[in-house]
Image (spheres, rainbow, N blue to C red):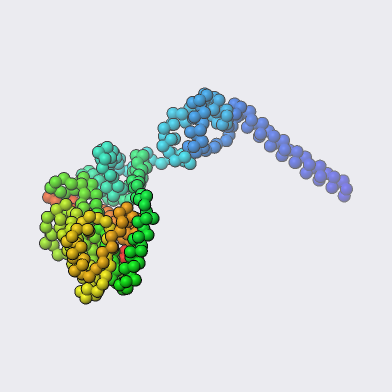
Amino acid sequence: NHGWIRFESLLKFSSQIDKINTIKKQADHLETSGSKVGQVNKQQRRSYDANFKITVVNKAESTNNCQAAKKFGVRECNVRRWRAEKQCLKDANSQRKSYHGPQSGRFIEVDRRVFEYVREKRSEGMPITRAVIQLKALEIARELNITGFKASLGWCRRMMRRNGLSLRRRMSLAQHLPSDFGEKLLPFQRFVINLRKKHSYPLDQIGNADQTPIYFDMPTSVTVNRKGEKSVRITVMLTCLADGSKLPPYVILKRKTVPKDPIAAGIIVRAQEKGWMESGLVVDLLKVVWGARYRGLRKRRNMLVLDAFRRHLTESVKSQVRAMNADLVIIPGGMTSQLQVLDVVVNKPFKDNLRKKYTEWLLSGNHALTPTGKIQKPSVRLLCELGLQLTIILIID
């Protein structure tokens, strides 16, 4: 028995030695078949991101390809290739490791013409959005008689990636508060507090009104305007009360006369040649909007807060305010970003959502066309209906 145990132990030991020798032979083979010192063996495959490749390229440019290959443990042929691709590596995502996938889409001619259009318009300083790209692509597809092309958002993103295009957000400068901010704020607060103590306004008799211009940028290919303008512009005066209720939006169109088309109930439309809020329109706003609020006809004591726009300070406006038994509170100049409720909470979401609805309308394909096949401008009724819907939603929220 002891002999058999020794014999089995010897067999196990010899098999382990054979395994060790086999591993050594494989290691020796890899070492002899590898590349020079400092380089990766031919049997190994590694991937490097763009940031690493740029680092190697910079080292190679300051020394030479061989020194860079030894320092970073890569092959010299890779260094040469990366140096040739330096610009592409700089433009790529720093974490990107490969460039797989098609370099051209399914509709090569559409891609090419859309890219040329974008480059031309950007050189002219025109803003280009993804919606504009989609509309232009649909127009080109119709010209080329391409059926089944949808110009979807996914296609737009891939086309931009293929052509090295990206979105850039315009940075707006924040409003700088005046140096005497505290000196203006405290008297304003005391004035409002004293008025409320003196007259005990109900919440539904305290209101804030603010105007905001809205531009609907239209791509050149779909603009229909006798004077060649590139946008549709309206001015909207929004008014809300301290109890959270809203008053009808007051829309000013950039035209001489109000259109004869029927307008949705709950919105007031006026026309002004330049689309601006002038003192006569401010008086009209006080009559048809502020005067039509709940219990407004009783001429209860009320408070209306406006910004320091000079059209709000004319004598005709002040006379109308006094006739309505109202106290006019003017926000100090340069402080609307802190004290104007509508400017802080409502105006920007309102404009963003209205532009979104307008873009959806552009891409819906359900448009009236001109005799030349171009998309007509949106009707006043459509813009007013969109504005009315969003005003209701925003004030409720």
Position of residue 223 relative to residue 296, above or below, is above
Observer-nearest of 131 and 28: 131
From the viewer's perspective, is 132 left or right of 69?
A: left
Observer-nearest of 380 and 269: 269
* Relative image position of residue 106 (x, y in whole percent): 32, 43
Position of residue 109 relative to residue 325, above or below, is above
* Relative image position of residue 119 (x, y in whole percent): 28, 38
* Relative image position of residue 58 (x, y in whole percent): 49, 29
Q: Image point 18% across, 58% down: which residue?
A: 279
Q: Image point 22% across, 70% down: which residue?
A: 325
Q: Which quadrant would residue 341 be assigned to in this image?
A: bottom left
Observer-nearest of 141 and 264: 264
Q: Residue furthest right?
A: 2
Q: Is residue 217 visible?
A: yes
Q: Image point 87% across, 49% down: which residue?
A: 1
Position of residue 375 relative to residue 162, above or below, is below
Observer-nearest of 185 and 312: 185
Q: How many marks?
A: 0
Quarter of the rendering occupied by the C terminus? bottom left
Q: Image point 33% across, 46% down: which residue?
A: 170
Q: Is residue 360 visible?
A: no
* Relative image position of residue 333 (x, y in whole percent): 30, 54
